[in-house]
Structure formats: C-alpha cells, structure tokens
Image (cartoon, rainbow, N blue to C red):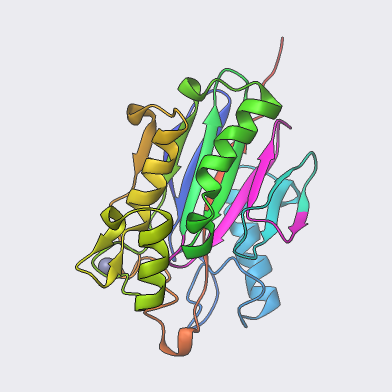
Amino acid sequence: MFQKVLETKTVVAGFTNRWGGVSESPYDTLNLALHVGDKREDVLENRRLLAKELGVDQENFVWMNQVHSDKIASVAQSGESLGTDGLITVQPGLALMVLVADCIPILFYDPRQKVIAVAHAGREGSFLNIAGKMILKLQKEYNSNTQDIQVFLGPSIQKDCYRIDQNTIQRFEKRWSKKYIYNETNLDLPLLNQDQLLKVGVKKENIFVSKTCNHCDQNYFSYRRAENNQTGRFAGIVLLKYVSTN
Ligand SMILES: [Zn+2]
C-alpha cells in the first residue's frame, strides 16, 4: 500500500505501490487516478483506503491535473489543482499527491520552514528542469535555505529500460549533456534530476534516489509495460501533520 521514506514529528513522506486497493485488471489494485479509464467508484474507494492507512481524512488530499509542464502552484486548501506539475504548501493537515507510472514522483521537505512540495518529473518536466525550479521557488517565496531541503525521488523508469527516439536524444544532449544518454538510445532521468538539484545547491546527502525501476518491478504500475498503455497510477505523497502547540 504505502512505503514511508521519511517520518518526523511534522511530516510523513512516501510512495504507494499497486497493492491494497479494489480496482480490477488492468488497474489492479491500488489505482489512484480518475483519468485512466478505471471505474470511478473503485478509485474513490482506493483513495479512501489510502487515507485510512495514512491516518488522515481524504478531504485533505491535494491532487494535480498534470500536464507535463514546469508550472508549480502554491496551495492552501485541498482539492484538485489544474494544469500544474508541482505543488507547495505550508498548510498543516494537507497531503500533496503526485501520480505517476514511469515518470519520477519527487517529494520535497524543508524542516526549518516547515514547507512541503511535490513535483511530477517526466521527460518534459525534466527537460524543463522542474526540480531545479521548485528549489528556486522554495528559496524565493518560502525563505528556504537550499542546504536544508530534503528531496526524495521515487520509483520510476530507470536508464536500462527508458529507450527513446533519436530526436529526443539529440534534444537532451543539446540542452543538457551527453552524460544523461545511456547506450546511445536511453535516457537517465533520475541522474538528470539529481544533477539539477545539486546545481541549485541541494546537498548530496539530502537527496534520496530510489533504485526501483517501476517498469521492471511488477509491484508498481508502468505505462510503458502495460498492454495498450492501459494501467493505473501510483502516488508520491508528502503530508504536513497538525502539530499540537500545547
Ligand atoms: Zn526497468
């Protein structure tokens, strides 16, 4: 259901896998996305089960209608944020959600400023440097010190599996570097995102990168692995807890 990568007094962060839900094949079982052709009531039940597992009210989830951009929205209430690929909040009680099935779900936490964020870094988001832009926004608008920020890259398609066309290879080589091209045909998105974070001052020891390839590991949904690309989405989640002050 949900694997934690961090839990402190103020925050919980982690990633779901595909088990513990009620959806049927090819969305079996914990599909959290409404837009992929799964039954609406099953997705809503999955979201309810996840909220229960996390010990929160599902009314506190904040979802994105992701569009492969570098747009980042600051939110203060739950619901769905349209046309964005990044979310930031300082509102206790909210759980920020990023949905993926091959793209990288990225979670951010600044323990000093008590600000949390998520980003959806697929091919386009990574090309546009959404991870680096998130850090700059946290610095500029939330007074974050980049040295404080912790970042978690979740299960995603790894370089051995991520074959792309030659036009895209050239685009990435030109904008970024040959360093991110693997075997001349594949792209290493986790490495690129890691470098984008380091470049804006995130400390290496504060960057956690999952080695899990969701394309190889059947415990995760994979858009590329699925027949006719029909599959569910798993989630990266950061939750800012209510902290009692007395
Ligand atoms: Zn793989």
Horizontal side, residue 205 vs residue 110: left or right? left
Q: Position of residue 61 (x, y in %)?
A: 69, 50
For the image shown, how many numbered marks are present on the structure? Answer: 0
What segment is highlighted magenta in the picture? 80-103
Residue drawn at (47%, 76%) of the image: 28
Q: Is residue 240 visible?
A: no
182 above or below 5? below
> Which of 147/176 is in front?
176
Q: Quadrant of residue 202?
A: top left
Please tell me in which quarter of the rendered image ligand 1 is found: bottom left
Is any atom of residue 138 visible in this view? yes
Residue, far bottom? 228
Q: Nearer the viewer, residue 128 or 109?
A: 128
Find the residue positioned furthest to the left.
183
Q: Is residue 67 above or below residue 106?
A: below
Q: Is residue 100 magenta?
A: yes
Q: Position of residue 118 (x, y in %)?
A: 58, 45
At 62% across and 31% down in the image, what residue appears?
138
Q: Position of residue 106 (x, y in %)?
A: 49, 47
Extreme residue toward the front, this view: 174
86 sits to left or right of 146: right
- In magenta stretch: residue 206: no
Image quadrant where residue 45 sits: bottom right
Q: Locate the C terminus and report the quarter of the image it occupies.
A: top right
Q: Nearer the viewer, residue 226 or 71?
A: 71
| Horizontal arrangement in the rendering, residue 192 relative to residue 43 (left or right) | left
Residue at the image point whose x is 28% and y is 52% from the top = 211
Rendering coords of residue 205 (x, y %): 33, 28
Residue displayed at 54% across by 32% down: 109
